[in-house]
Image (cartoon, rainbow, N blue to C red):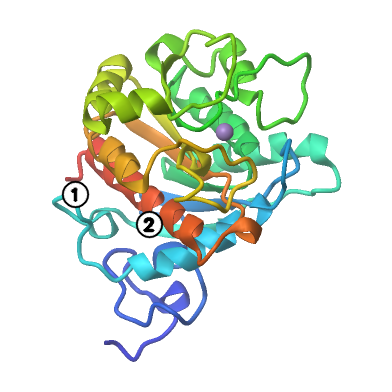
Amino acid sequence: MSLETDFAMTRESLRGANDESTYGGITSFMRRRYSRDLAGVDVAVLGVPFDLATTNRAGTRMGPRGIRTASASLAWEQGVQGWDFSPLEALAIVDYGDCPFDAGTPDQVPDQIYRQARDILATDTGLLSLGGDHFVSYPLLRAHAEKYGPMALIHFDAHSDTWEDDGPRIDHGTMFYHATKEGLVIPEHSAQIGLRTYNESSLGFNIFDAPAVHEQGAVAVAEQVRGIVGNRPCYLTFDIDCLDPSFAPGTGTPVVGGLSTHQALQLLQNLRGINLMGMDVVEVAPPYDVSEITSLAAATMALQQLCLYTVARGRA
Ligand SMILES: [Mn+2]
């Protein structure tokens, strides 16, 4: 073990596993270095601690910090089970810190998130964002679609988040309705996985609800999703409430009957080969969590997303 401490400050290489204690120091994501210098950086990790769009229980403003803390216990491994490489070795990753916004002027927050994401993407750095409630994916998607064109969306969630809306409301249940109407995503080449709430309109999305995953199996569903998405530029958004509350109690709007962490890992690993351009993990609400179960699940899913991104960029 290195006696150098606080790699979040002192790490010289942006690559590699972490040879220091998992329990001390600054809680950057995966103990990556905190930096806003994106020269030579492949992926910036951005916290978006915004939860004013929640319709039920708030608390996801604590999500980025919770995920960062839990991720420290994943940072020491030389590889990732289910993959034949380490994304921490293959990619230069920094923790960019949190997106600045003024919670006192909520109507301005979407644009503040959008501009932060746009400025990072303009440097040809990939973006892994940590929510925050699911609304944050909407301005993030806008920034990605501006760069890559209309995107295939792979959306893990208990909820469709496509409920019809009548105006520019800030609501974490309607933003994919707006995103679709604005042409940011292509619903016929997108998939929603794990749903278990009622919405009479699919808006054209391909839906693999939780019963479908339980009945068909994660591998078979992933195969279908790969076919639907093809090689199109793809954005992957992982709402932690796609997991069953027994696997992710720390979220604002839990719904029973969801995926296990095992099923989610199988799904993500079998999406290998998608043309992933951007990703997020959202809806982690540490105030309702137990023993960091949810934050650990979220950090693990984010690491899997980095694995998918590594393959998509031809680095593995
Ligand atoms: Mn959602």
- Residue 22 on image: x %, y %: 39, 77
Q: Is residue 220 left or right of residue 243?
A: left
- Residue 168 on image: x %, y %: 77, 21
Q: Is residue 129 left or right of residue 253?
A: left
Q: Residue at x 85, y 42 (%)?
A: 105
Q: Residue at x 17, y 53 (%)?
A: 85
Q: Is residue 174 left or right of residue 210?
A: right
Judge whether 290 appears above or below 273 on screen: below
Q: Which residue is mark 2?
A: 93
Query: Total number of numbered labels?
Result: 2
Looking at this view, name the residue that lies furthest to the bottom. 3
Q: Is residue 18 left or right of residue 99?
A: left
- Residue 190 on image: x %, y %: 41, 18
Q: Residues within 10 Å of mark 2 (few under 14, many from 20)?
A: many
Q: Which circle's residue, 2 or 1, is located before the other in the chain?
A: 1
User: Which amino acid type is shown beneath numbered disc 1?
Assistant: Gly
Q: Which mark is residue 82?
A: 1
The quadrant the N terminus occupies is: bottom left
Quarter of the rendering containing residue 223: top left
